[in-house]
Image (spheres, rainbow, N blue to C red):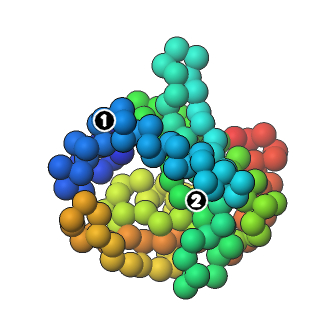
Amino acid sequence: MESWRSTYAGMLPKDMLLKLSSADHEARWWRHVLGRFRRRHYVYVAEHETDGVIGFISGGPARESGLDPEAEIYALYLLDEFQGEGVGRALFLRLANRLNRECGPSLVVWVLSENPSRYFYEAMGGRRIGRRSERMGGAEVQETAYGWADMAELVAVGRSGQE
C-alpha cells in the first residue's frame, strides 16, 4: 500500500490514497488476492533480508475479452527505494514464465497513462495495444495497455538466469 501511495500521488484522489493506509484495508485486499482466485492467480513477493517485503507482482488469465492476450499482469509494486535495482524485472520475468505455461503466450498489463512506471513496460518490450477510461476513487483516469504477442523472448531471458 505504501508503494501505491507513492506511485499514484497526484494521479489519484488523495482521499482514496489515504484510505489505503489502514491495516484492515490491506488485509482485506490480500485476502481477496490470495483467496477466491488463488488457483489461477499467481503472486510472487520480493523480500529484502533486512527490510522485509519490498514488492510483489500478481497475474493470471486476462480479465478483459476485448483484447487478444491470454494472460495479464494485474499488479506490480515495488517500494521506491528498491526501484532500478532489477527487482521488478526479476519479478516480471518470473511471472511471465509462469503465465506463459499456465495461460498462453500473449500478455497484457494495464497502467495509468500518467504513471512514469509505464516506461518499465516499454523497456521490457511491451507495445501499446489499447486505451481505456476508468473511474478510480471518484476520478476519471486514463489507462494504457501494454502487450506482448509472444512471451517466448521474456521467458528465455528469465530461464537464462539474467534476472
User: In front of the other: label 1 or label 2?
Assistant: 1
Residue 78 x, y percent position in the rendering:
47, 39
> Which residue is the extreme one toward the bottom?
66
Q: Is residue 25 above or below residue 40?
A: above
Residue 64 occupies which quadrant of the picture? bottom right
Question: x, y percentage for residue 107?
Answer: 64, 68
Image height check: is 26 above or below 47?
A: below
Q: Which mark is residue 64?
A: none
Q: Quadrant of the C terminus?
A: top right
Q: Is residue 98 left or right of residue 136?
A: right
**Residue in the picture at 50% in, 42% down:** 30
SS at badge 1: loop
Q: Horizontally, is 13 left or right of 146 in the view?
A: left
Instruction: Provide the residue designation for mark 1.
Output: 22
Q: Label 1: few (<14), some or many (≥20) within 10 Å?
A: few
Q: Is residue 21 above or below residue 50?
A: below
